[in-house]
Amino acid sequence: MTQNQQILLDNRPQGEAVESNFRLVRTEVPALRDGEVLVRHHYLSLDPYMRGRMNDSKSYAASQPLGEVMIGGTVGEVVESRNPKFAVGDQVVGMGGWQEYSVVDGNAPGMLRKVDTTHVPLSHYLGAVGMPGVTAYYGLVKIIAPKAGETVVVSAATGAVGSAFAALAKARGCRVVGIAGGPEKCRYATEELGFDACIDYRENADVKAMARALKEACPDGIDGYFENVGGYILDAVLLRTNAFARVAVCGMIAGYDGQPLPLQNPALILINRLKVEGFIVSEHMEVWPDALKELGTLVASGKLRPRETVAQGLAAAPAAFLGLLKGKNFGKQLVKLV
């Protein structure tokens, strides 16, 4: 029998998440039934949304059950198959979770997708050419819907979503401004990702300072904002929005520990006639083919050069995840499992 390591959610966080919320276990991989596929995971994706799932509270998706394998995107290789759609050696992307192997029903729609690694590295299917990239695409193209020459801003600018957002927005002729933590990330944003400007939130740590920095970086105001963070950064952005600006709300990482994130001046939504729309990318599967095609082309052509932070081995996942929540990663946070 094949041994499988798994990380379970052992207990729910009380405030800030800690490593002891997780538990590493060893199990045996069950024998396959007809239609099933055994996948050996090469990489596990770590994403901010996972922190929200750890809470037992109302959200857009069910809470992560206690005592079960943590949810997470994976890429890997089919090592055994009892399904004619998948052959041993196929490279695949799915939601295998925080474990080394997963048994997948190969007939279930959307559970497992074959990918081509000729021009796009396998790991990128968890980032730029995966869920984060499609997230950036949907928020930009379907909600912000920018015209050439408009100014768009994204928080968490050098992460997997932000870096894809920059490439997609530059391809549409926008002025693109990022918000990131630290001078190294801001240099990476402007020198490698193509941002026109990047604001260091650590040097602009309150609403007034951030609003001043945004005024300098966005002299014509802000037409579109892609929100990953919330808190005072959102307050500062709203102060600089133009009339009829669009705000795509993807994440609120500043509030994932459970504290509320009140808006200082919600009247700006009315004053500037803003469109503010939250979205969950998995509810918009119709855009995935077009989004993945464009993102794959951007990566293959070198117009999108995503960076990755890679932790080694499943046991390193909890610490890497907690580091992600504090902005310690550079680009997409992955765990290498092979």
Image (spheres, grey):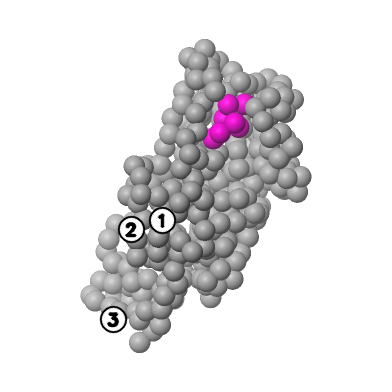
Residue at left offset 35%, top offset 49%: 56
The residue positioned farthest toward the bottom in the image shown: 1
Is 14 a magenta residue? no
The residue positioned farthest toward the left in the image shown: 34
| Residue that mark 2 sits on | 65
| Quarter location, residue 233 | top right
Of label 2 and label 1, which has the lower sequence position? 1
In the picture, the quarter occupied by the N terminus is bottom left
Within 10 Å of disc 2 (Cα), the crowding (few <14, some 14-19, many 20+) is some
**Label annotation for residue 12:** 1
Of label 3 and label 1, which has the lower sequence position? 1
Nearest to the observer: residue 320 or residue 11: 11
Is 234 a magenta residue? yes
**Could you say where residue 54 lies in the image, as x and y percent from the top left?**
41, 53
For the residues labelled 2 and 3, the Cα–Cα distance comes to 24 Å
Within 10 Å of disc 1 (Cα), the crowding (few <14, some 14-19, many 20+) is some
Q: Judge left or right: residue 91 versus residue 197.
A: left
**Could you say where residue 69 lies in the image, as x and y percent from the top left?**
38, 65
**Label annotation for residue 31:** 3
Nearest to the observer: residue 29 or residue 33: 29
Residue at left offset 68%, top offset 38%: 201
Q: Are marks 2 and 3 in contact (CB under 8 Å)?
A: no
For the residues labelled 2 and 1, the Cα–Cα distance comes to 10 Å
Q: Judge left or right: residue 280 versus residue 171.
A: left
For the residues labelled 3 and 1, the Cα–Cα distance comes to 32 Å
Identity of the amino acid at label 3?
Ala
**Could you say where residue 271 lies in the image, as x and y percent from the top left?**
52, 12
Q: Which residues are magenta?
A: 230-236
Q: Main secondary structure of the magenta part?
A: helix
From the viewer's perspective, is residue 143 above or below residue 307? above
Nearest to the observer: residue 260 or residue 169: 260
Identity of the amino acid at label 1?
Arg
